[in-house]
Image (spheres, rainbow, N blue to C red):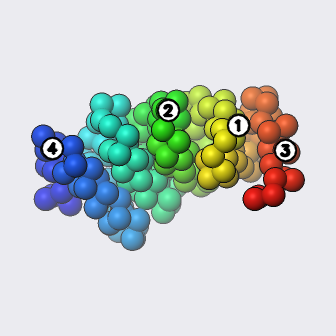
């Protein structure tokens, strides 16, 4: 981890992207390695550069955040505490659908653990943008956004109401009869 961290600051964008991808693959493998990403203070560096970089780096950075957040509520909380929610929500507004997919997947992994984390995702303003993602033409993005909305809504009635209030139901209901669903 200590050797990969400086590569995130390299001058060559492809090296930065490769370092982020390597960190994501390590964090995805086990919760111990995900803990190492957190303890080496890599998350704030990723979050900071998430708003500054190209779409390939944004996908890789969102992959790291997802890979850390998926393991446990405490690791997901570490991702939230690093300031990642605002950066991920901003990625939902990107033009590139693959960046939106990566951000929605990361938000889904954060929201799935408990109602506090799901509420944090709602408070960051993600629900409205996820509803817009459900309306996009790309089927993969529709599925990931629908999954993220379900991960948010499953915890409490209030969170489910937040999803309903953003107008998600008609778009999600239309997907039930989709031939590729």
Of callouts 2 and 3, the N-terminal one: 2
Quick one: label 4, few (<14), some, or many (20+) residues within 10 Å? few
- Could you tell me which residue is drawn at 53 percent across and 42 percent down? 97
Q: Which residue is mark 2?
A: 95
Residue 30 bears which disc, if any? none
Marks 1/2: CA distance? 14 Å
Of callouts 4 and 1, the N-terminal one: 4
Of all residues, the one furthest to the bottom in this rendering is: 29
- 2 sits to left or right of 116: left
Of callouts 2 and 4, the N-terminal one: 4
Quick one: label 1, few (<14), some, or many (20+) residues within 10 Å? some
Quadrant where the C terminus lies? bottom right
Q: Which residue is mark 1?
A: 135
Marks 4/3: CA distance? 44 Å
Marks 2/3: CA distance? 24 Å
- Could you tell me which residue is drawn at 66 percent across and 33 percent down? 132
Q: Which residue is mark 4?
A: 12
User: Is label 3 in a helix, a strand or a loop?
Assistant: helix
- 142 sits to left or right of 27: right
Q: Which is nearer the eye, 78 or 152?
A: 152
Q: Which residue is mark 3?
A: 174
Horizontal and vertical percent for residue 117?
57, 44
- Relative vertical location of residue 1 with respect to residue 99 in this rendering, above or below: below
């Amino acid at each position: 981890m200590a050797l990969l961290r400086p590569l995130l600051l390299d001058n060559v964008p492809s090296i930065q992207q490769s370092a982020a991808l390597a960190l994501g693959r390590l964090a995805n493998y086990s919760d111990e390695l995900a803990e190492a990403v957190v303890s080496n203070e890599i998350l704030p560096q990723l979050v900071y550069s998430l708003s500054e970089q190209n779409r390939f780096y944004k996908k890789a950075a969102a992959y790291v955040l997802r890979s850390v957040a998926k393991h446990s509520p405490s690791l997901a909380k570490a991702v939230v505490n690093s300031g990642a929610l605002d950066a991920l929500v901003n990625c939902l507004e990107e033009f590139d659908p693959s960046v939106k997919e990566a951000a929605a997947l990361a938000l889904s992994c954060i929201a799935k653990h408990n109602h506090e984390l799901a509420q944090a995702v709602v408070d960051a303003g993600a629900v409205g943008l996820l509803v817009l993602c459900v309306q996009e033409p790309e089927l993969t993005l529709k599925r990931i956004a629908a999954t993220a909305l379900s991960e948010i809504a499953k915890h409490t009635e209030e969170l489910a109401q937040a999803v309903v209030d953003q107008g998600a139901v008609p778009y999600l209901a239309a997907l039930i009869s989709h031939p590729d669903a």
